[in-house]
């Protein structure tokens, strides 16, 4: 990351682009409003996403504990588990705390369980849906509860509303860009994770300004 080239844009224009990025403006609109070339704005937004992903990666060793929700979701293409052309993503959310996401090759036990074991403190309470990939949690170091979505009302504690809320927010954000380029999907995903974990735009702005000073100014 230290090799990232400094931006040639003036600090004023960089500052305005950072504000538009936080506001969720597309690069095309931001370019027009800030008086910069469209490619320049797109490249600058890409740099911001790279910085966010890099900074979040540095936090991956931090484990989550307490009440945890786990779920997997599919991005792009048609709805449904494992539908063709979709990108599977696994999410772990600490209730009242942060979410962590990871692109996965599939939703098999052998894929999901090692991620949970790396990221979740043993003895935590883990809520999941009834997907068979989570069966092995029943004989693990976690207290495992399943949510049956077929039941009309979930028990008060027994739900995965938090992680489902994150998936909805991430998909809504990505829809604004008329299809995210597959090669950059991971960067957009980490951006959504960062936005969710720091939901106040003014704190997003000050954090991003700080990172820009380190990497781009």
Image (cartoon, rainbow, N blue to C red):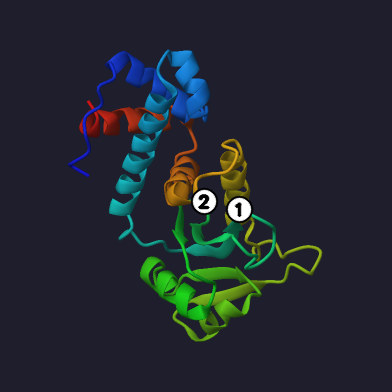
Residue at image point 46% right, 61% down: 103
Relative to 99, residue 118 above or below: below
Residue 115 position, x and y percent, is: 42, 70
**In the structure shown, which secondary structural element does the residue marked by tag 2 occupy?**
loop
Left or right side of 22 for 164 = right
- Dot 2, how many residues are within 10 Å of its Cα: few (below 14), some (14-19), or many (20+)? few
**In the structure shown, which secondary structural element does the residue marked by tag 1 occupy?**
loop
Circle count = 2
The image's mark for residue 145 is none
Give the number of the mark in front: 2 or 1.
Answer: 1
Residue closest to the far left:
2
In terms of image quadrants, where is residue 46? top left
Upstream in sequence: badge 2 or badge 1 = 1
Residue at image point 41% right, 61% down: 64
Q: Tell me the quadrant of the picture where the N terminus can be found.
A: top left
In terms of image quadrants, where is residue 123? bottom left
Relative to 69, residue 185 above or below: above
Left or right side of 30 for 53 = left
> Residues at badges 2 and 1 in contact (C-beta under 8 Å)?
no
Left or right side of 11 for 123 = right
Residue 37 position, x and y percent, is: 41, 20
Viewer-side residue, 45 vs 84: 84
Kindly identify which residue carries mark 2.
Answer: 96
Kindly identify which residue carries mark 1.
Answer: 76
Measure how far apart labels 2 and 1 are at the Cα level. 28 Å
Viewer-side residue, 215 vs 85: 85
Residue at image point 32% right, 53% down: 57
Residue 21 position, x and y percent, is: 45, 29
């Amino acid at each position: 990351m230290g090799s990232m080239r400094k931006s040639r844009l003036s600090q004023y224009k960089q500052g305005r682009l950072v504000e538009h990025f936080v506001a969720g403006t597309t690069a095309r609109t931001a370019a027009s409003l800030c008086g910069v070339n469209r490619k320049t704005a797109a490249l600058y937004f890409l740099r911001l996403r790279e910085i966010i992903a890099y900074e979040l990666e540095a936090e991956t060793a931090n484990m989550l504990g307490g009440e945890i929700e786990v779920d997997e979701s599919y991005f792009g293409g048609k709805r449904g588990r494992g539908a063709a052309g979709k990108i599977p993503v696994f999410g772990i959310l600490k209730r009242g705390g942060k979410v962590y996401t990871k692109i996965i090759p599939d939703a098999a036990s052998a894929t999901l369980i090692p991620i949970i074991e790396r990221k979740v403190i043993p003895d935590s309470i883990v809520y999941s849906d009834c997907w068979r990939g989570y069966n092995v949690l029943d004989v693990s170091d976690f207290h495992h509860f399943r949510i049956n979505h077929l039941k009309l009302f979930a028990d008060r504690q027994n739900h995965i509303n938090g992680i489902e809320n994150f998936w909805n927010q991430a998909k809504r954000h990505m829809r604004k860009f008329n299809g995210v380029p597959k090669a950059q999907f991971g960067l957009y995903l980490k951006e959504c994770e960062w936005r969710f974990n720091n939901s106040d735009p003014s704190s997003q702005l000050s954090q991003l300004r700080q990172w820009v000073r380190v990497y781009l100014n």
